Image (spheres, helix red, strand yellow):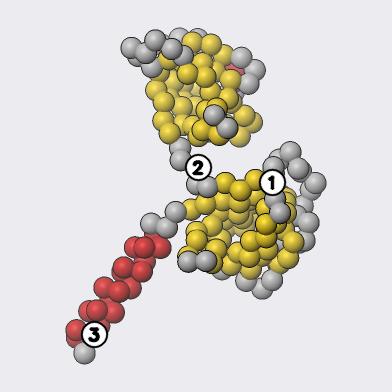
């Protein structure tokens, strides 16, 4: 009896550990169906049936929502884990507005965020160039509206970044370009 309890506890721990280490992926598209505990997301020409449980974080138009509020035609980005051939949602960000530019229809593997530290060399309306200490070339980062910027510990914008500031950039690479997700700058 004691051995079986111990084996059951070890098996439960292994299942939980495997679930915690499952790679999160995301898909963006249009909702074509919503059920009691699932939704169907059309991504390009492919439909994905994604299970949704009570632990999933759901927002609609920037506000916390229940799955029942999501409707056919809403645009959504769903973060999920793949379990065999099934998809399990952990986060759903949906919009009821026609926002094709806000939610481009793409299928994304997990975006691996990378880190860069250096000094700002140039700033323009949509990007910054920075150089690591000892490097001979600048690295250019695209800066979109979704990029969080902090300057000297305060929330800032691209306009607040200045040549010469020390900068740490979290970024992802898409289409051969580096896209900043967050920028933290400190004045000299």
Q: From what the image shows, is residue 116 above or below residue 122?
A: below
Q: From what the image shows, is residue 131 above or below residue 22?
A: above
> Residues under labels 3 and 1: Cα distance?
49 Å
Q: Which mark is residue 14?
A: none
In the image, what residue occupies the spot 50% across and 42% down? Answer: 111
Q: Secondary structure at mark 2?
A: loop
Q: Which image quarter holds the C terminus?
A: top left
Q: Residues within 10 Å of mark 2 (few under 14, many from 20)?
A: few
**Which mark's residue is nearer the viewer, 2 or 3?**
2
Left or right, 97 with respect to 35, comes to right
Q: Position of residue 63 (x, y in %)?
A: 67, 52
Q: Position of residue 57 (x, y in %)?
A: 57, 58
Q: Residues within 10 Å of mark 3 (few under 14, many from 20)?
A: few
Furthest toward the bottom, the residue is 1
In the image, what residue occupies the spot 51% across and 33% down? Answer: 173
Q: Secondary structure at mark 1?
A: loop
Q: Nearer the viewer, residue 25 or 150?
A: 25
Q: Which mark is residue 4?
A: 3
Q: Which mark is residue 111?
A: 2
Which residue is under mark 1?
105
Furthest toward the left, the residue is 3
Instruction: Say whether marks 3 and 1 touch (CB < 8 Å).
Output: no
Q: Is residue 42 visible?
A: yes
């Amino acid at each position: 009896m004691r051995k079986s309890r111990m084996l059951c506890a070890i098996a439960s721990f292994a299942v939980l550990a495997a679930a915690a280490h499952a790679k999160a992926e995301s898909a963006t598209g249009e909702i074509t169906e919503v059920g009691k505990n699932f939704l169907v997301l059309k991504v390009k020409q492919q439909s994905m049936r994604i299970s949704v449980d009570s632990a999933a974080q759901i927002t609609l138009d920037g506000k916390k929502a229940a799955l029942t509020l999501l409707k056919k035609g809403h645009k959504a980005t769903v973060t999920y884990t793949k379990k065999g051939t099934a998809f399990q949602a952990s986060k759903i960000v949906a919009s009821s507005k026609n926002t094709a530019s806000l939610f481009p229809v793409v299928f994304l593997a997990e975006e691996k965020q990378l880190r860069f530290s250096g000094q700002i060399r140039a700033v323009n309306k949509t990007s910054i160039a920075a150089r690591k200490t000892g490097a001979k070339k600048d690295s250019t980062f695209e800066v979109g509206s979704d990029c969080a910027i902090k300057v000297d510990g305060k929330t800032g914008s691209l306009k607040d970044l200045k040549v010469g500031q020390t900068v740490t950039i979290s970024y992802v690479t898409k289409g051969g370009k580096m896209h900043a997700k967050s920028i933290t700058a400190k004045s000299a």
